[in-house]
Structure formats: structure tokens, C-alpha cells
Image (cartoon, coloured by chain):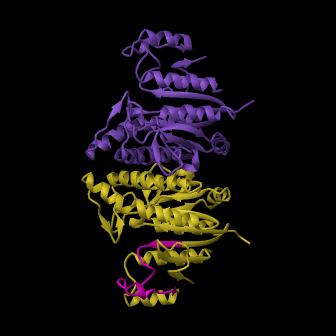
Chain colours: A yellow, B purple
Amino acid sequence: MKEKLTIVKVGGKIVEESDTLKQLLYDFSSISGHKILVHGGGRSATNLASKLGIESKMVDGRRITDADMLKIVTMVYGGLVNKNIVAGLQALGINALGLTGADMNVIRSIKRPVKNIDYGFVGDVETTDGNLLSELIKKSIVPVMAPLTHDGKGNLLNTNADTIAGETAKALAPYFDVTLIFCFEKKGVLTNAEDDNSLIPILTPDLFKQYQTDGTINGGMIPKIENSFAALKAGVNQVIITLATAIDGKSGTIIRL
Amino acid sequence: MKEKLTIVKVGGKIVEESDTLKQLLYDFSSISGHKILVHGGGRSATNLASKLGIESKMVDGRRITDADMLKIVTMVYGGLVNKNIVAGLQALGINALGLTGADMNVIRSIKRPVKNIDYGFVGDVETTDGNLLSELIKKSIVPVMAPLTHDGKGNLLNTNADTIAGETAKALAPYFDVTLIFCFEKKGVLTNAEDDNSLIPILTPDLFKQYQTDGTINGGMIPKIENSFAALKAGVNQVIITLATAIDGKSGTIIRL
């Protein structure tokens, strides 16, 4: 029997405001068993960029990362957000270790090829070292992963935090009974974004196809759900999309094959 | 017989400009045996602060770290400088791992008590986990240490990089035959700061006392040398102060008890 591992991905305001972050870290620290936290930090990056007179360009919710923006996200994701989370977890008795993909070569990526859009210094994940992460986890270390990877040629690359969470879950599926929890600002996947009571409790590939065709599910939710199905197919036990205030995994939308 | 460990502390321009950084990382990667890199990043912190309209206040070469400045150094030291070094070393086949003191609770400090000067969020090192670092090193991992520590209560603290290097050297002296190399922009300790030919090849406590009394050695060099003697007394094998372009340890000033 494999031991349980919970991977929580949090993004948005919750990790970037000290009050909500404090509550989140407390909730995270209360999860029993092995765990990993994957974080975003886009709002802080946009804020810092704006203060420095650098424009944030987004295409379909993805950040265009030129050389200046790469410096911003390296500072914000790898430094400000990551290290504050690590220090906060240490205060709760959690032996956190902040990681980018470059650290111990945990996640290597390739710069996204330019097709219609040049995303700049954005990395698509190639390899994730599940063996190394599993060794750390078994020593009661809690990895805190920033959405940055590297190409092995000396370049850091900006990488979507949902992707980091999904790839990490897949890489660890051979070692642990993995539950992947995507947290955000809604109760889960909703049929009406404005109505929290319209939660879809269980989402299967067929249902997803239907909701995608009729436009019920759209935008940034689509890659999140596609990531979820890919993770399940790769052996992840369970994927849940839920509120960041409900990371016990007892509510939200369960993604199921 | 203990294995050899070289701890290199680099600060100043060399780690903050891409050309000199590249050469430094190449030189560092060429050091045989186990190694650790400790870096600064003050110039970049000052630059970023200035762009954001935040004034850098220094007292005797030490940065006053208010809440805004703590965010700046967390971004610059923990993110920008640290992660670029890690990615650069990975490209040279060195399995680097970026660490602040908060990561895995490696270096815990206490906020400096306010006496004549309120340094703000500045930490004085209390404990350094030599055992943990030695385990990492024995797995061929190369720690890259940012000058940030934590107080165990959730606060990151700005900590002088020379101190981080000295404390790390001391904590690892029971496990390795440690050489500590402080690099900067001069050939070593000079009797005349303007004359590179005035290098002091060997500096003993008696000689130091004499040079300090007659004013030959002053300013920021004094704590660096005091750190060096403390490290030697705690079992560090050798301390060298040298140029950042000479980190093979074959030139510079040798500090000796």
C-alpha cells in the first residue's frame, strides 16, 4: 500500500495577501500525511511590473514573458512568494523547502516554440524528477514549488503553476497515492460562474466534452481540467477543484475518469 | 581523513552582471570536491529599491531593512540572484540547490535587538544545521546560499552574506576539511587600498591587531577578518580573502591563527 500524498496548488490573491495566506498555510499544515504546495503569484508580478513601468501582456490568461518580465517573475515567484510561504510553514512546524525547477534539476523544460504567439521565456515541462521529490518527502520535507523551471542551458523559464502541479502529481504517482487539489476563488467547476450553487460535483470526460461544446465550461478552466484528466490517466488517484478555503478535499468538484 | 569542502562567498558586482557571473560560475564549477556558494546582491537590491522609490539606508556598510526593504531583498537575494546562479550552475553540470535559512530550517536567527541603531528586519544567526548541509553535500548537491535567514516565527530576516559564509563554515567543520574563501574586488587584504601590490600574504591575529590600531585595516574589512578568525577557532581549516577572479584559492591573503 502506497502512502498518501496531497499536492495543493494555490494561486491568486490568497497567497499574496498576508491574512489569507496565514489561514491557507494553517489549513495546509493541518493536512495529514505527506504534502506539497505549488503556488502562483501572478497578481504580485503584475503589480511589481506596473510599479517598474513594465506592461504585463497576457494571451488567453497566459503571461508573455520577455527578458524584463522574466526578472520580475523570478523575483516574485522564486523570492517573495516562495520564501514567505516557506518561512510561514516553518513557523507552523512544517519543514518546508522552496524549489524552482532549477533547484536540484527538479523540473526541466524547453522554451515554448514560437507559433502564432511568441510567449517569450515560457517553459513547457519535459522532465520532473519524481524520485528526488519522493526522497525529500519521505524525509518529512515539504516541497514548496514556484512556477519556474529551467532549460538546462542556464535559462529560467516561466511555467504555469497548474502545469507544475499536474506534472509533479504525475511524476509522484508511482511512489504515492496522490490526491491533487487545485484551489481557486470558486467552490469548484460551476455551470454558472456567477452562482456558487451551480457546482458540478463530479466531472467525467464525457460530461466535460458536453459542457465544453455548449460553452458552459470555457477559458482558463479548460486547461485546468485537461491537466486533471491527464494526471488521472498517469496514475494520480484523485483530482479535486475547490475553494482555497476548503483544501481538506471534502468539497468542490471531483474530476474522475 | 575528512573530505575537502570549499565554501566560496562572492558579493558585489561580480554576481550581478551576466558576463562576470558566467566566468565566476565557470571558475566555481572547476573547484574540485565538495563546494558551497554563498552570494550577496546588495547592488541589485539598491537598484530595485531606487526604481521603486525606496531609499537604501546604510550604517557602517550594513543595510537598514524596513518592511519594504525586506521585500526587496527577499525578491533580489532569494529570487533573482539565487535562482540565476542555480540555473547557471545546472548548465555547468553542477547540481545546485538554492537555499535561504528558512528552507529546511537551515539557518535560524534572531532579529537584532535595537541598541543605538534599529537595523529593522536583520537577523543575527543562532543555529546552522551542519548535519543537514553535510547530508546534501555528500549527495553531490551544491548549496547556493542567499543572505536571508528566518526567526522560526514566520519572519524572514536579512543577514550579512559574510556571516552566512562564516557560520556555514563553522557548522560544517566537524564534517569536512573546510576552506573558506571570501571573494571581493581586491586581491586580498591590502595595506594600501589603492595599491594591489600592497597585499598582506598572511594575516595573523597579532598582525591584524597592529594594522587595526594604526588604521591600515578599517571599515567593512574588519568584520570580514573577525569572521575569519572566529571560523578558524571553530575548526575551519583555512580562510582566504581574495579576488573573485581567483577562487582557486592560490592567491590572496591567507588568514591564520
Quadrant for the C terminus of chain B in the image: top right
Q: What's the residue at 54%, 76% (across, down)? A: A230
Res. B232 visible in picture: yes
Image quadrant assignment for residue A6: bottom right
- Of residues A160 and A126, the one nearer the viewer is A160
**Placement of B100 over or under A244, stated as above or below:** above
- Of residues A85 and A27, the one nearer the viewer is A27
Q: Going by the image, does A104 lie left or right of B41?
A: right
Magenta stretch: includes residue A187: yes
- Residue A161 appears at what percent x and percent y? 46, 65
Q: What's the residue at 50%, 89% (across, down)? A: A206
**Placement of B199 over or under B54, stated as above or below:** above
- Residue B115 appears at what percent x and percent y? 42, 32
**Placement of A226 over or under B52, stated as above or below:** below
Residue that protrudes farthest toward the front in the picture: B115
Q: What's the residue at 35%, 70% (across, down)? A: A61
Image quadrant assignment for residue A160: bottom left
Res. B204 visible in picture: no
The kind of secondary structure the magenta stretch mainly shows is loop
Quadrant for the N terminus of chain B in the image: top right
Magenta stretch: includes residue A195: yes
Q: Going by the image, does B201 lie left or right of B184?
A: right
Q: Going by the image, does A54 lie left or right of A213?
A: left
Magenta segment: A181-202
**Placement of B124 over or under A12, stated as above or below:** above
- Residue B149 appears at what percent x and percent y? 50, 43
Q: Going by the image, does A69 lie left or right of A208?
A: left
Number of numbered discs overlaid on the protein picture:
0
Q: What's the residue at 32%, 35% (across, down)? A: B57
- Residue A33 appears at what percent x and percent y? 65, 66
